[in-house]
Image (cartoon, coloured by chain):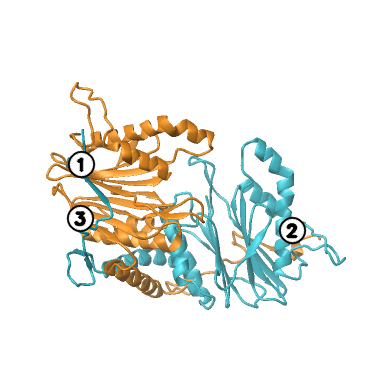
Chain colours: A cyan, B orange
Amino acid sequence: MTYCVAIKLNAGLVFLSDSRTNAGLDHISTFRKMMVYEKRGERFMVLLSAGNLSISQSVREILQTQQLEDENGGPPITIWNAKSMFDATRVLGAAVRHIQERDGKALERAGVDFNCSLVFGGQIAGESPRLFQVYSAGNFIEATAETPYFQIGEAKYGKPVLDRVLTPTTPLNEAAKCALVSMDSTLKSNLSVGLPLDLVVYDTDALACDNIACIDEFNQYFRMVRNTWGDKLRQAFDSIEDPHWDSGDNAASIQPDSSAIRPVKKITNSNVML
Amino acid sequence: MTYCVAIKLNAGLVFLSDSRTNAGLDHISTFRKMMVYEKRGERFMVLLSAGNLSISQSVREILQTQQLEDENGGPPITIWNAKSMFDATRVLGAAVRHIQERDGKALERAGVDFNCSLVFGGQIAGESPRLFQVYSAGNFIEATAETPYFQIGEAKYGKPVLDRVLTPTTPLNEAAKCALVSMDSTLKSNLSVGLPLDLVVYDTDALACDNIACIDEFNQYFRMVRNTWGDKLRQAFDSIEDPHWDSGDNAASIQPDSSAIRPVKKITNSNVML
């Protein structure tokens, strides 16, 4: 399995990926799921991948040379000359379709789904940062202000904190912290997601980025986040009053339903013919 | 979908279920997923169900009259005369197999999985409270001190808080609060889980229980939990320092990898032949 999350903010973009790959529980390996493409001062792009590793590696391999016909008769479009992230993402979609054509039938014969989820984001000079999620069919969607993040892989454990914290105005480093907390919940709950993590924090309009870190078990900041978050959650939980079973007017009262209005069926043996 | 959680503690048992059922996103209904069986002073049992509603309703319908041969030549075993929760759960497993035999082939022809997950727990005089999870094949597992809870249905969003809070010594009402917080995270993230909730909090050795509540959107305690938990989580999150990108010795420093040791592949266009 995999967990990757990418966030689009007014201030920039955050990308975080784990690095565990498994083919069954007894075949676990480490593979990086992040690729960074940069032409300093002109374009900066990050690709995160989940799904079948042979597919995502193949897509990455051909992405740089994949071409798309320009409908206006210009030179073929590649990720290195695309004028927009939308066009660069179309090139990525074409690379996925290329691999589908090459391997899809053989995978189908072997009973293997063509399973490939990608997140692709970045900035090309002339437009704002943009973030896309690309599906197995090469089609894609773009993040907006209402939904400023995408997750691929094991998304559920780490989703609640993203929903509670992120808005387009969240500062970049706060969003990086949020991604790391989200990853921590996922690491705790799914053994097939594992360290080290790769983190990129990109500032809007920089058109280049060196805030790229590999976070392993010795990383001081991530250790602090993991320890502190568990304790703080516990404190938050403890500070909420436990319920009381009474008919009082206290905020913590839960009034038991009288049997006259009880919606849960309570079956007593007196009802039953045995 | 469904979300149900049941917890076994030294102090007793907690059961919580939602009530939303859906057949596609455009066919949403409310069905209770909790049944309570009680013979005051002798046995108290609760059944939670998830999966295909026609299967779980059929299982519930026949459960009271389902019989199991006594290997020692005594009268047939039912949930009303079983001497242990283990035997009562065997009766439940037999009821699941009965429905499988009756409906399984027709469901298979229609391309529908025989999908049924059950949680069954309670106490019978003479033993301690016990809690079981029953699968579609009628086989089952029992909760232990190391894993004091079972979830069925949409389990992932609400699992982290259970893992962080629950131990066998957790007080009953604190565990009820924990189940409600776990449900809150699930309700926020999955539209196919919905109010009202059914809650049972059973005290060890009571062998009867009237702490049964139906919790709807107007329930004062659950509203307080929902509002407070969101705010407290946010405060906990805010109290952790954001990362800094520098090489300082500060606990919040994330040192960017130098390009010499960078494990993430950064591709610049100078590498590429176009």
Looking at numbered disc 3 in the image, what kind of residue is underneath it? Ser
Q: Residue A259 — which label?
A: 3
User: Tag 2's secondary structure?
Assistant: loop
Distance from the alpha carbon under mark 3 to that under mark 2: 69 Å
Q: Residue A271 — which label?
A: 1
Asked whether disc 1 touches disc 2, contact meaning CB atoms under 8 Å apart, the reply is no
Q: Nearer the viewer, residue B119 or A130?
A: B119
| Residue B77 in picture, x, y percent from top left | 22, 30
Q: Nearer the viewer, residue A104 or B18?
A: B18
Which comes sooner in the sequence, label 3 or label 1? 3
Work out whether residue B9 can be spotted: yes
Q: Answer left or right for A42 relative to B182.
A: right
User: Tag 3's secondary structure?
Assistant: loop
Looking at numbered disc 2 in the image, what kind of residue is underneath it? Gln
Circle 2 sits on which residue?
A64
Asked whether disc 3 touches disc 1, contact meaning CB atoms under 8 Å apart, the reply is no
Which comes sooner in the sequence, label 1 or label 2? 2
Query: Do the residues marked 1 and 2 share a common chain?
Result: yes
Task: Point out the frontmost of discs 1 and 2.
Answer: 1
